[in-house]
Amino acid sequence: MTIIYNDYNIKKHSTFKIGGNVKTVAFPETIEELINLLSSEEYDYILGNCSNILFSSDYINKSIILTEKLNKYFINGCKINVSCGTKGPIVSSECRKRNLSGFEFLIGFPGSFGGMICMNASAHNQSISDTFISANIYDVKNKKVITLKKEEMNFKYRNSIISNSGYVLLNADFELKRGNEEDIDEIMKRNIEFRKTRQPSLTYPNAGSIFKNPLNDSAGRLLDLCEMKGQTEGGAMVFDKHANFIINKDNASSKDVLKLMYRMYSKVKEKYTISLKPEIIYIGNKGTEEYKLWELMTENIQMAQK
């Protein structure tokens, strides 16, 4: 049964541990309930694990669906069906037990499949699109379920057909390959070690990479050259081991994060004439000071729903 809350505090659902109260938040427990919500009412955002989301610390006059209870997955041989709210590390670990290769990179991803497919998540020479077969998607405009195959998904770097459309991912099918247990273990260990040494753990609340990599370059490299590591704004700080991460060091507000982001963005633009594009998504009310900072950085880029 779908549970709906009004004036709901969203902070605990954010890996940033930042956020105020939201007008309406719904928690469907089945795909059918999600479809019913989407067909009967208008919702501003459909979110999963909120691992790349910055919620405003102020009241958010939005309606949100959280898919965290839609966490079923089925494995049959090399084929896997995954619901949109299922977390990547859970499926990655189960695939390792079955000697299935292709999801090793997900072991360190805090996100859920809805968001990861939407943004074509990738790391360490693996990506969601590599093993993707097809997905069941709800077409909000035409109020119907459609099926899209891999070639119809328009997968690109940190982007897919879902990113800027009225489509909501319901579940998806993948086909992995049989692998060697020792090789799979080794890849996963390397991925975990890389994250431990280069990226902040969730001991320091964060939302992953702040900016997308520009073409043929690295946002982290550019920010490092601009000496952004360790810089602070209120309770927010640029991670001292990787300049493309911001951590919530001391009860940071969303305004702290956005001000620090804008400083990072401005330094790179001034020094290299490169306008970095945010990888995280900001959710707040238009017209506020925060939203104006966000608009300066996105420069008319349409905000995606994930």
Image (spheres, rainbow, N blue to C red):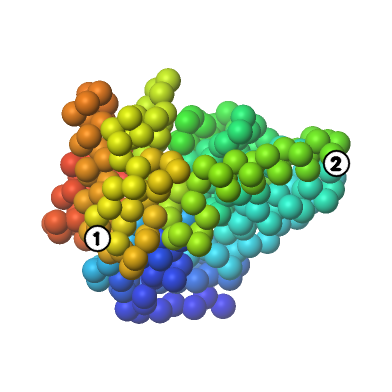
Residue 84 drawn at (x, y percent): 58, 55
Q: Looking at this view, is 149 or 84 the one in front?
A: 84
**Left or right of 194 on screen, residue 270:** left
Residue 43 falls in image quadrant: bottom left
Q: How many marks?
A: 2
| Earlier residue among tags 2 and 1 | 2
- Give the CA separation, mark 2 to mark 1: 46 Å
Which of the labelled discs sits on residue 214, or is there none? none
User: What residue sits 71% from the left and 43% below the top?
Assistant: 188
Q: Is residue 134 visible?
A: no
Q: Which residue is the site of mark 2?
A: 181
Which of the labelled discs sits on residue 234, or is there none? 1
Q: Is residue 288 above or below residue 161?
A: below
User: What residue sits 25% from the left and 23% below the top?
Assistant: 272
User: What residue sits 74% from the left and 47% below the top?
Assistant: 80
Q: Nearer the viewer, mark 2 or mark 1?
A: 1
Residue 135 drawn at (x, y percent): 60, 44
